[in-house]
Image (spheres, rainbow, N blue to C red):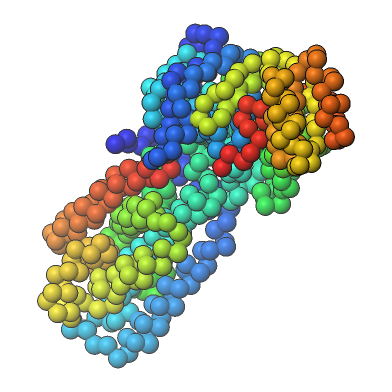
Amino acid sequence: MRFCSWRFIRVWQRNRDVFLRLWHAETPAFVAEPVIILLAMGLGLGAYVGLVDGQRYIEFIAPGLIAGYAMFSASFECTYGSFVRLEHQRTFDAIIATPLEIEDVTAGEIFWGATRAALTGIAMLVIASAFGLVHSPYALLIPLVCFLEGLMFASIALFFTSIVPSIYSFNYYFSLFITPMFFFSGVFFPLSSFPDLVQKLSWVVPLTPAVHFTRALVSGNLHPSLIISLIIILAFAIPFFLASMITMRRRLVV
Amino acid sequence: MIDNRLEIATMIAIEIKNLTKKFKDIVAVNNVDLKIYEGECFGLLGPNGAGKTSLIRMVTAVSPPTSGEIYILGHDLKLHSREIKALLGVIPQIDNLDPDLTVIQNLLTFARYFDIPRREALKRSIEALSLLQLEDRSNSPIRELSGGMRRRLLIARGLINSPRILVLDEPTVGLDPQAKHLVWDKLIQLKAQGITQLLCTQNMEEADFLCDRVAIMHAGKIVDIDAPKELISKHLGKNVWEIELDTDRENKIVKMLQDKGLDFQIAGNRIYLFGDEGTDLLPQLTAPHRVRNRPPTLEDVFLKLTGRSLTE
């Protein structure tokens, strides 16, 4: 297989420029939704929820929502976003006629997806702080964690994008993979409330280690198991990153 | 700066040896050899499905050959695809302008793919826009451009890296005559600057007008290569007679032409009769059918070599 060169940065810059031109068209929705969820679930549902250690429910879900919405950002960018550029706008065809190769395009898309996740992480962190839900300076590392998490989800998403026949295939991706993960990775309920089997399964679902990470950083309660979370994230990110380079070449360079 | 590390060692701009491209069970390009010289405008003609686009995609390094070799300005495409792509300007048939960006941003972003520094990129973008008469559209979104403007912008984009070789796939398809002539003028101007052009087209008038030499492709192979004028005199002579037939007398006339050993082609209820001298009387023999005499064109050569029926 071939690997990307430093030129992937050109694709990242292209996506950044488009974002700077059009961000006002989509960002409000991306910020409004997590705020609504935070308020509705945190304050509304939270009034009926008593957590074992006496923590407020809204404090419990805030870090989970940061990781969850970072996941959504990277996933949307590298499914619908990348697919439109790939098939509808033929943007990648234009790019690979220049000194860039398809691997540079692939890496540029994935790193941009990760950047979107980090930007979402920053926005969410600001919102959570505004509600007084952040208790540790370690929380400043959240954009970095969201970036890593974003690399993982962008890689998985772009791999899927490179093999699907149509844009409608993403309905499956979101309703069978992304949305269930949102509910079974410890964002809204502690994993310990699930049956044993579900608990074990959720540990190898990609969102779980990310939630584990953001929760630790927001509370300042760092513990050695974060190493395992990091390993799980990399164990998803690296193979999918490499695989999507192969499948993108297979799809576009024929 | 642009990557100009490749030493230019030869006068041959594009050399293709034994080039083949297969897709599953289809042979799109079948063992093609071709030399295109620096500074010439070379036309690639052929019906749909003849393999032109497959050939062009291989030459522009976006599609790997099944077998065979391609040398661009003396350098092996397999080994130096990035450097070679930096020397090419590709104007695709499908409009793949970036609709998320404005006109000038399209050019600047493209220049960045070639590592052209910002200030130089801006200078070249403005030049390219004024060359193609788009300067007052600089800040328009792509969706506000007409079809003709988009095509001109595609050409401007293909010039942004000051290419040594331009590869154009149907550059004037769908343009009104005014826009078409503007594009032709610019291509002639670029040729005068020494830029080699590989022009893929279905428009015979365009090929005749612009190209020094043309290759006619059919079913993955090159059937003939020569200057348009040479092709016409070689294959058709000085005259074409078009004879419109009634079906009831068709067989008789066809037999008569065959007996005389004449060069003709049947399409529908029409016979095309080619030749220099001696054929003048024949149309009279075939009277009372409608007969028309005219000088042969490149289109006649094209149809003679690739057949008058649909190929796909």
| Relative vertical location of residue A94 with respect to residue A158 in this rendering, above or below | above
Q: Is residue B108 or residue B171 the one in the foreground?
A: B171
State the residue at coordinates (69%, 19%).
Answer: B261
Numbered disc total: 0
Which quadrant of the view contains residue B195?
Answer: top right
In the displayed structure, does residue A36 sit left or right of residue A133?
A: right
Q: Position of residue A210 (x, y in %)?
A: 26, 62
Judge left or right: residue B134 versus residue A217: right
Q: Is residue B57 above or below residue A117?
A: above
- Residue A173 on image: x %, y %: 36, 65
Q: Which residue is rendered at x = 18% and y = 66% of the image?
A: A203
In the image shown, does A135 or B5 lie closer to the viewer? Answer: B5
Q: Please give the name of the residue rendered at 73% of the width and 25% of the height, measured from the top-left corner.
A: B257
Q: Residue at x 71, y 30 (%)?
A: B254
Left or right position of B202 against A64: right
Q: Is residue B11 above or below residue B72?
A: above
Which one is in front, A190 or B25? B25
Residue B9 in view here: yes
Residue A68 visible to an observer of this rendering = no
Question: Is B101 left, or right, of B240 in this rendering?
Answer: left
The quadrant of the rendering that contains the C terminus of chain B is: top right
Query: Which image quarter: residue A196?
Result: bottom left
Residue B310 percent coordinates (x, y): 62, 41
In the displayed structure, B130 sits above or below A76; it is above
Pinpoint residue B289: horizontal percent, then vertical percent. Answer: 85, 35
